[in-house]
Amino acid sequence: MGSHTKGFCFSFPGEDNRGLNRSDSKYQAGMVSGVGLRQLRITVPGKPPSKTDDGADSTPFTSRKVKENFGRRQSISMGRKDLIDRPGKHVLSACYPNPFDKWDVFVSNRCLPMRTFSETQPSAARNPGKEPHPNSVVKSQLTNGLTLLTKEIPGCPIVSTVIFYRVGSRNEEPGQTGKSHFLEHMLFKGTRKYPKGSIDQITLSSGGTNNAFTSEDCTAYYFDFSADRFEVALDIESDRMVDTQFPEVEYQHEKQVVIEELKINLDSPWGALEQEVHAMAFKMHPYHHPVVGWIEDLERATRDEMQAYYRKFYHPNNAILVLVGGIQTDRVVNWVESKFGSIPAGPPAPPVHVVEPPQRGERQAILKHPTQLERLHVAYHAPAASNQESFALRLGALALAGGRSSRLYRRLIEQDRTAVNVSAEFSETIDPTLFEIRAEVVPGKSVEEVEQAVTQEVTRLTQEPLLPADLQKTQNMVEAGFEFGRERPLQEAIQIGHAELLMGFEYYETYAERTREVTREQVQASAQKFLTTDNRTVGRLLLGN
């Protein structure tokens, strides 16, 4: 059930355009997916899975291992239906309800009005007599530095509990890669109070679910329970924050699981190509290495090193705890204080000061792989979530590959008939990231043909503003996806916590408004600044052994 992820997006801005259920993390289940081996096999409604040329299951959410992950570069991936082809007329979007459902598809005859995401208010427990607004997020902080965010949803029968640790692969030093993701696995091995297997047994017997994910920027663990029994999640999380056990036998067993997970990812065409492209695009910054780590580092890793890494980052002052659903904030604050309040604060996590130098020329990577479809992966350096230009680039990604009316879909799939599918992806990260375009080539066509068409369409985005209708369409897609992304407590808890991790949860309050403020000229200017030949890395996966 554990997984590694790449990236995060607060909305579902786009359609897959691939129809493939790829084996790498981003393409397993859209915003919620992964490659982890702690998985639960489930069956969901739908027709039997079909197979792609690579032998991958091409029917999302149908009798397969659902691998959950919330992360970077998943913003326009997997299982999407047609989105907005006529702006202002139809808003068609999808949200991921929970790990055991298919995508829900929603249609409206207008763009949904945004309800207020949050109103920062003092905790009711610290301000007697002041009740939080039911639609507000309440932020509290314990004396040991633990950040607590709560959102009450009156009448909701579910409570989602998510704890984020500010440690991901960006915090790993050279030679020590993969520890964040490896540690995620170890936290399910138990504590003295909750021995191996008991966490899952308690979750199952209480009718709940649990899982975890690791990205470049964070590691997070979550539970879903009914509203009358969610307190056990707080007890489990407080206990494994300080008392996770590292038996040598379990450590060695889990090491092999993680190494096998890495190999599985590299066996997939996209997993191998992405790793090559990212490693070439980032020369200095830790985003250079994969979330799961380099296999040589994992093979050398020792139990003592892993335990030291745990002690270094797993402290209340390095954590964000989020609860959303049928809760009462004042009671939650008291419970959290009783469970976490006695845990001492740890030393501040070492900051990440590495800055990737500007790229001054196109880089190219060629990879050969036994596959039926050649692939193209183009990655441009792009800004972090804190940069206002990220909003314009997100709309640019949608204009390029957000649904069947997008430019690349029409050009590559309908007009040229050179690609099986195409996507453009850009999402929120702490540090500057990548704006990525991927395409799978029709057998008999060449990667070079597809690359030339992609370059032409990107150049067109830099040379002329979007049509007003196209801008509105992309804004509608972000807004609809943002709204529907809050339909389930778990989704919203993840989004609230990740917003706090990036810039403070207030970032979410103005998300839709800031998207609506983007102009056609700003989309063009951001494309001119970032989507240049000298600023990109081009990866080609060709047929071979």
Image (cartoon, rainbow, N blue to C red):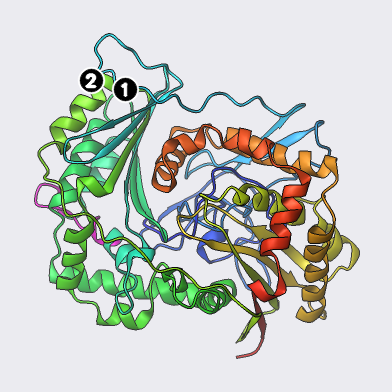
Q: Position of residue 342 (x, y in %)?
A: 9, 38
Q: Is residue 305 above or below residue 331?
A: below
Q: Position of residue 408 (x, y in %)?
A: 80, 60
Q: Residue at x 26, y 20 (%)?
A: 330
Which residue extends farthest right? 415
Q: Is residue 122 above or below residue 313?
A: above
Instruction: Specify whether 25 is left or right of 439.
Output: left
Residue under pointer 2 = 126
State the quadrant of the C terminus.
bottom right
Residue 418 in sight: yes
Which residue extends farthest top? 129
State the quadrant of the N terminus.
bottom left
Q: Residue at x 28, y 35 (%)?
A: 206
Instruction: Specify whether 274 is left or right of 407.
Output: left
Q: Residue at x 82, y 31 (%)?
A: 89
Q: Which residues are magenta?
A: 185-195
Residue under pointer 1 = 122
